[in-house]
Image: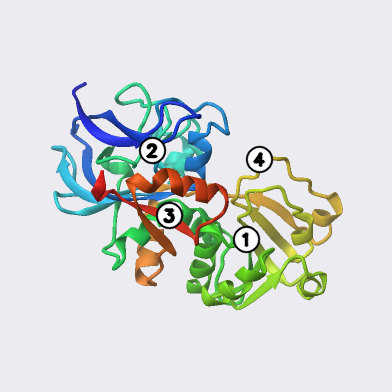
Amino acid sequence: MNTTPIKAFGTYSANEPLQEMTINRREVQAHDVEIELLYCGICHSDLHQIKDDFGGTMFPIVPGHEIVGRVTAVGNHVKNFKVGDLAAVGCIVDSCGHCEYCEEGIEQFCDEGVTYSFNSPDKVSGGHTFGGFSKTYVCNEKYVLQMPAFENLAAAAPLLCAGITVYSPLKHWQAGPGKKVGILGIGGLGHLAIKIAKAMGAEVVVFTTSPAKVADAIRLGADEAVLSTDSEQMAKYSRKLHFIIDTVSAKHDVNTYLNLLRHDGSVVLVGLPPEMLEVHAFNVVMGRRSFSGSNIGGITETQEMLDFCFEHNITAESEIITIQEVNKAFERLEKGDVKYRFVIDLASL
């Protein structure tokens, strides 16, 4: 297969900083869309992958899966995109297409495993996929999203991962009028969960361990904000919430939050703590409660989320950086020093 060399930013090992490198993108095939990249969000999972925290990282690695750009070429059989269109690529760039999950539009659960936008075996070109810290991206149009013309296009990039990660469970557990929804943690995921849940019509209660973030939760649109280290405040919410979106990616006691649920409520984990979490039997048996999880969303639902966020003027609170600042950004991200998402302006690559 013919390929084209392009500039990108990545690393050759877990112990090296990111640096400029040359990678090869496949030339446009019949069903492909080529996108000149404008912006790419930085996700905490990018940090885990370049550090090989989960194991299995394929080096060299070019991270980035919150990808926004403009179409520069299309294959002969492409129907839904033309040169000049805004387009986006999220986490998924391929799946088997024929299992029950793919047929239901929940490709993220594909029986044969999805191809992610970076650090996945590349079934088309061979080798492995390279992400959005690069000049261009080539993808089958089935997995390319129509990007609405957000006024702040850069700040919309994090919707491609953080946005769908919280939108999908909020929709599945039916956030809306008459529902009291808890959001645990205010970071890249949690701050968007507040905005989206409010736009759905739910009453939103935020739980945080940070006194400084209590006021910020209200600024972001929460109806109430609770310091979770204050037992008196927490006691007021016993058996009050319909469900809770848990965005925390560190070890924490989920039983505390199970006890805040009404009957048939659920704590829904979307964070990825590296350690095992314990669930006490009585906290789920009493009240028929559950501890659940959710993982990104399918392509159709991701498009739905983008359109919803455009309609309600929802974007991420973002700090825009150049690609040359990316190593410093990862250092800050590791320390939690960002409110609430870094986005790379790729013009300087």
Q: Secondary structure at mark 1?
A: loop
**Other-residue count near label 1 (Cα within 10 Å), few / some / many at <14 / 14–19 / ≥20:** many
User: Marks 3 and 2: in contact by CB < 8 Å?
Assistant: no
Give the residue number, with chain letter if any, for mark 2. 117
Mark nearest the camera among 1 and 2 is 1
| First-in-chain label (1 vs 4) | 1
**Looking at the image, which is closer to me, 29 or 156?**
156
**Looking at the image, which is closer to me, 66 or 8?**
8
CA distance for labels 1 and 2: 27 Å
For the point 40% across and 38% down, the residue is: 63
Give the residue number, with chain letter if any, for mark 4. 274
Q: Position of residue 243 (x, y in %)?
A: 66, 63
- In the image, taking residue 102 as reference, residue 294 lies left or right, namely right
In this rendering, is residue 185 above or below 32? Answer: below
**Other-residue count near label 2 (Cα within 10 Å), few / some / many at <14 / 14–19 / ≥20:** many
Amino acid carrying label 1: it is Gly
Give the residue number, with chain letter if any, for mark 1. 185
Mark nearest the camera among 2 and 3 is 3
| First-in-chain label (2 vs 3) | 2
Mark nearest the camera among 3 and 4 is 3
CA distance for labels 3 and 4: 23 Å
| First-in-chain label (2 vs 4) | 2
Q: Is residue 80 visible?
A: no
For the point 18% across and 33% down, the residue is: 30
For the point 53% across and 76% down, the residue is: 219
Amino acid carrying label 2: it is Ser
Give the residue number, with chain letter if any, for mark 3. 342
